[in-house]
Amino acid sequence: KILAATEGGLAIISSDDGKTWKPQTSNLFQSPDQYTNHIIKFNYSKETGLLASTWAGIYKSLDTGKTWELYIHIQSPFDMVVDVNKTLYTSVRSQVYQADLKQQTPVAGTIRGNLSIYDSLMSAQSIKFDANGKLFLGSLAGGMYSTTDGGINWNSYNKGAEGVKDVYYMA
């Protein structure tokens, strides 16, 4: 199944590899101001489901997006990645937020590294792991950064891309 969050709070789902789509009734997408930035699938020993970053926080669904519960209350998270230890990292303004997904109940999480020490106007945007487990962050007004200690310390990673300030997405 493929779930897509669209403009205006509408969710659509396909059960045939994208050939046809139908509206997905969901408590997450009923409010037009509940914009969804990113949806990822997670899978660990006890659960498989979806996480959605919205303006109001990160929501979790265990039924392919039919119902959602607030999982992490944090304002305006954007991109999300999960490491091999089932730790979620999400970009939030000038910070990276970390939470342990093995917990069954909503989690508080921890701010891991304040990127505003590099540039007060910088906004964390895209966050990805490479094949070796190094975490990379693309930002608006700040270029690219990397960390090898879970986000406690960040290093500028702009060699060869010195003129690049806005990084929207990384893959």
Image: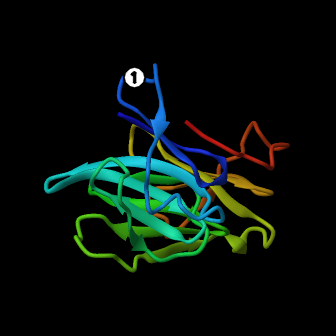
Considering depth in this image, is 119 or 5 the residue closer to the camera?
5
* Residue 56 rendering spot, x and y as whole percentages: 56, 72
Q: Classify 10 Å Cα crowding around label 1: few (below 14), some (14-19), many (20 and above).
A: few
Left or right, residue 88 beside residue 78: left
**Viewer-proximal residue, 45 or 150?**
45
What residue lies at 71% left-to-right and 73% top-to-bottom? 116
Q: Position of residue 100 (x, y in %)?
A: 31, 68
User: Residue at coordinates 47% horizontally, 49% vertically from top-left?
Assistant: 39
Residue under label 1, please give it: 17
Residue found 66% across the figure and 48% down from its top: 7
Quarter of the image where the C terminus is located: top right
As drawn, 128 above or below 61: above
**Please, is residue 20 above or below residue 22 in the view?**
above
Q: For the point 42% across and 64% down, which residue is it?
A: 59
User: In this figure, what is the number of numbered marks?
Assistant: 1
Estimate the x, y position of residue 54 in percent, counting from the top left. Answer: 55, 62
- In percent of width and height, residue 145 lies at 63, 54
Q: Secondary structure at mark 1?
A: loop
Q: Residue furthest bottom?
A: 108
Instruction: Residue type at mark 1: give it.
Output: Asp
Q: Report whether 65 appears left or right of 112.
A: left
Asked if residue 149 can be seen in this view, the reply is no
